[in-house]
Amino acid sequence: MGKITYDIQFYADWHAGSGLSAGMESDSTCLKDSNGLPFLPGRTTKGLLRTEGERLCALGKYSDELLTWVFGAGENKDKGVTGKQGKVFFTDASLPKSEQKALKGKETYLYRNIASTAIDKSTGVAKEGSLRVMEVTVPLKLEGVIYVEQEKELVREFLHDCLRGVKLLGANRHRGLGRCEFKLKN
């Protein structure tokens, strides 16, 4: 089994949502591990890379067969396609161990709240009940691992191109959040 390690360097605040709120403090909180530290689920990374892989295949750079081999294929009874599991596994991306240790007890410094509201175009005044507060994670670096069932140079090249293509992730990307860069470490 092959192993590909990568970093995600965030250049702007980002929000990977937990689906929970913090009452009056925040309408949407960040996803945190059991120690209160931010992480990005492997399934999120897989989805981002699959989307980029589909774009690369549509451009003719790679084959749809490679895309299916790497990410799998869902079941589509209308087209007679049965589900097929991909040959790669994505771990959660988390802070490096040394930083996790250094941040013990200081987790709250990794987050802040930002507020936004909708403005009524005709009056220029905030719309009633539109104030939203979102918790975001400050820019930092996460690291993750991709395990590949069979080590193949074409698969490594494909995943590398997919990683390089992702420049934004998380909520409110169109509003300036989540600017990032993925980098292969090996």
Image: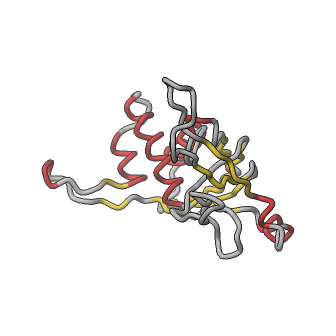
Q: Is residue 96 left or right of residue 172?
A: right
Give the image location of residue 30, x and y in percent: 62, 60
Q: Nearer the viewer, residue 147 or 10?
A: 10
- Image coords of residue 116 (percent x, y): 61, 42
Identify which residue, 77 or 67, lies in the foreground: 77
Image position, residue 123 (x, y; %): 53, 26
The answer to whether residue 11 is above or below residue 119 is below
**Image point (55%, 57%), residue name:** 17
Q: Residue at x 65, y 46 (%)?
A: 115
Q: Residue at x 41, y 27 (%)?
A: 59
From the viewer's side, name the closer residue of 24 and 50: 24
Q: What residue occupies the far right of the structure in this picture?
A: 102
Can residue 186 be seen in this snapshot?
no
Residue 47 percent across, percent down from the top left = 46, 51
**Quarter of image, res 41:** bottom right
Eyeballing the image, is 45 above or below 126? below
Q: Is residue 113 left or right of residue 28?
A: right
**Residue drawn at (58%, 49%) of the image:** 132
